[in-house]
């Protein structure tokens, strides 16, 4: 049996007690029709703390006895909502699991079918073997990509040029097919009009901003930015932040728009490799924040969060070109009817006011957590708590050398390009 090979990357994770061998029986009947009985069933955490903030992710190890007398070892990835008191209430109210359910049940299979019809076999997401809504919760069971040697890249180190290019090409494949799907089938449901920012959570957004801003603002002076005072002085007020958020709900109908992934960073991508170390296949994960809008949102978010420090700014413009070339290729393959987006227009979109909130949320919210080493407190509950403990944790994050080393150059870069010119939001 494989018990000795079981690795639990997060011993602190509480595993819901209803996830049992009995629960998995109907799933196995479909997925492994030749099984006779379950010999062992072990659920453990699938990922270390700090890799995912909105879900409970488990890896399920199962040993089966088959009808022919042989035994078989299986693993599955199980995704469910956070416990109510660990941030689950807010996640449920945001409706992001409902959105992901639509993505896996309807849109992702349809997107992959459009590629097949055009003669290309392009897998965008892991195979989803089971979805269920029960007691106000939504659960997913996925194939375990690790079995086929898919893995994540170290989020703290960031991605080298080869990974950035391949991942941007994968994003372009997703954006292209979503734009073609909308052209053929009509608009996505209204749930997809919102991403991180919702029409009805303005007050919560402002409260969350103020909780974090007090320690963030304090930390900026220690990042080693030359003339730090001007950046500290121009940091957004809560009113400017709120206007920035609201402007993100506006979509320019004359521009190229598509379904953005919304949370596109290295831990939401897995790759497999050829024997010579080259990247073989790439799969995207986590479709909870998808939103109709400008691809600039994903582009800015991804470069900010995931490119390795030494190429983040140096290769910035090349990344956009690599993405654009694959986007145009896929739109042409799928017979997109509207004018193809121009590279100059794509660059221009990075500066549009309604896309600003994505790079800002990235440096304010996500990057400090991504650059923070795995820690039992790396969870949404600890990061957002409005008390002294929360302030201490955030201060550790905002002054963490691996974060400040990036921000020393990144903040001025966006400031000088006008992207962090928050006085535009009056």
Image (cartoon, rainbow, N blue to C red):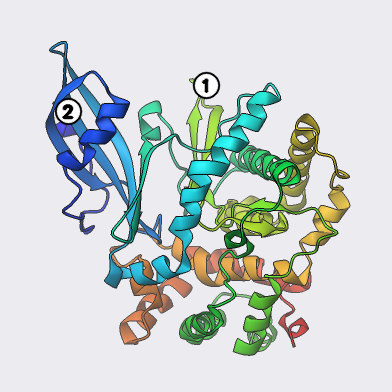
**On-image quarter of the C terminus:** bottom right
Q: Position of residue 115 (x, y in %)?
A: 66, 29
Q: Is residue 182 above or below residue 206?
A: above
Q: Position of residue 338 (x, y in %)?
A: 86, 44
Mark 2 or 1 closer to N-term? 2
Question: Disc 2 vs disc 1: which is toward the camera?
Answer: 2
Q: How many marks?
A: 2
Front-most of residues 134 and 265 = 134
How far apart, in angstroms, are the residues tagged by discs 2 and 1?
33 Å
Front-most of residues 338 and 15 = 338
**On-image quarter of the N terminus:** top left
Disc 2: which residue:
63
The label number, if any, that marks residue 362 in the structure image: none
Q: Is residue 73 left or right of residue 37?
A: right
Q: Position of residue 84 (x, y in %)?
A: 29, 69
In which quarter of the view is residue 4 placed? top left
At horizontal 64% and vertical 42% (from top left) the residue drawn is: 174
Is residue 153 visible in this depiction of the protein? yes
Task: Say few, some or many: other residues with alpha carbon within 10 Å of mark 2 (under 14 / 14 to 19 / 20 or more).
Answer: some
User: Is the residue under label 1 in contact with that under label 2 (CB below 8 Å)?
Assistant: no
Q: Secondary structure at mark 1?
A: loop
Q: Secondary structure at mark 2?
A: strand
Front-most of residues 126 and 107 = 107
Q: Position of residue 59 (x, y in %)?
A: 28, 42
Task: Say few, some or many: other residues with alpha carbon within 10 Å of mark 1 (under 14 / 14 to 19 / 20 or more).
Answer: few
Disc 1: which residue:
276
Q: Is residue 315 left or right of residue 263?
A: right
At horizontal 47% and vertical 84% (from top left) the residue drawn is: 215
At horizontal 69% and vertical 57% (from top left) the residue drawn is: 313
Is residue 157 visible in this depiction of the protein? no
């Amino acid at each position: 049996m494989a018990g000795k090979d079981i690795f639990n990357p997060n011993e602190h994770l509480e595993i819901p007690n209803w996830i049992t061998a009995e629960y998995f029986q109907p799933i196995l009947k479909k997925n492994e029709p030749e099984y006779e009985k379950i010999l062992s069933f072990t659920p453990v955490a699938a990922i270390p703390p700090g890799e995912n903030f909105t879900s409970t992710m488990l890896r399920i190890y199962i040993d089966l006895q088959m009808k022919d007398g042989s035994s078989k070892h299986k693993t599955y990835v199980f995704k469910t909502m956070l416990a109510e008191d660990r941030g689950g209430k807010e996640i449920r109210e945001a409706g992001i699991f409902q959105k992901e359910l639509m993505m896996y049940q309807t849109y992702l299979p349809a997107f992959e079918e459009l590629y097949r019809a055009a003669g290309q076999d392009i897998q965008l997401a892991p195979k989803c073997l089971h979805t269920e809504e029960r007691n106000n919760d939504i659960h997913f069971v996925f194939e375990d990509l690790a079995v086929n040697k898919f893995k994540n890249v170290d989020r703290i180190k960031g991605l080298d040029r080869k990974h950035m290019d391949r991942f941007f090409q994968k994003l372009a494949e997703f954006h292209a097919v979503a734009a073609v799907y909308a052209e053929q089938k009509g608009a996505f449901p209204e749930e997809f009009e919102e991403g991180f920012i919702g029409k009805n959570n303005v007050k919560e957004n402002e409260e969350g901003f103020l909780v974090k801003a007090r320690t963030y603002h304090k930390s900026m002076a220690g990042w080693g930015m030359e003339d730090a005072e001007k950046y500290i002085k121009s940091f957004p007020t809560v009113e400017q932040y709120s206007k920035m958020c609201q402007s993100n709900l506006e979509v320019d109908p004359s521009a190229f728009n598509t379904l953005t992934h919304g949370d596109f960073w290295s831990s939401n991508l897995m790759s497999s490799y050829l024997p010579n170390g080259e990247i073989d296949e790439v799969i995207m994960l986590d479709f909870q924040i998808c939103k109709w809008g400008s691809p600039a949102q994903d582009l800015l978010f991804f470069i900010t969060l995931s490119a390795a420090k030494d190429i983040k700014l140096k290769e910035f413009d090349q990344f956009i070109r690599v993405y654009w070339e694959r986007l145009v290729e896929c739109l042409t393959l799928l017979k997109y009817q509207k004018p193809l987006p121009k590279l100059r227009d794509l660059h221009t979109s990075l500066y549009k006011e309604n896309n600003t909130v994505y790079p800002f949320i990235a440096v304010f919210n996500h990057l400090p957590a991504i650059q923070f080493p795995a820690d039992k407190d790396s969870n949404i509950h600890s990061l957002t708590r409005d008390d002294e403990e929360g302030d201490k944790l955030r201060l550790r994050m905002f002054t963490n050398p691996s974060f400040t080393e990036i921000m020393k150059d990144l903040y001025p870069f966006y400031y000088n390009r006008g992207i962090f010119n928050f006085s535009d939001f009056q």
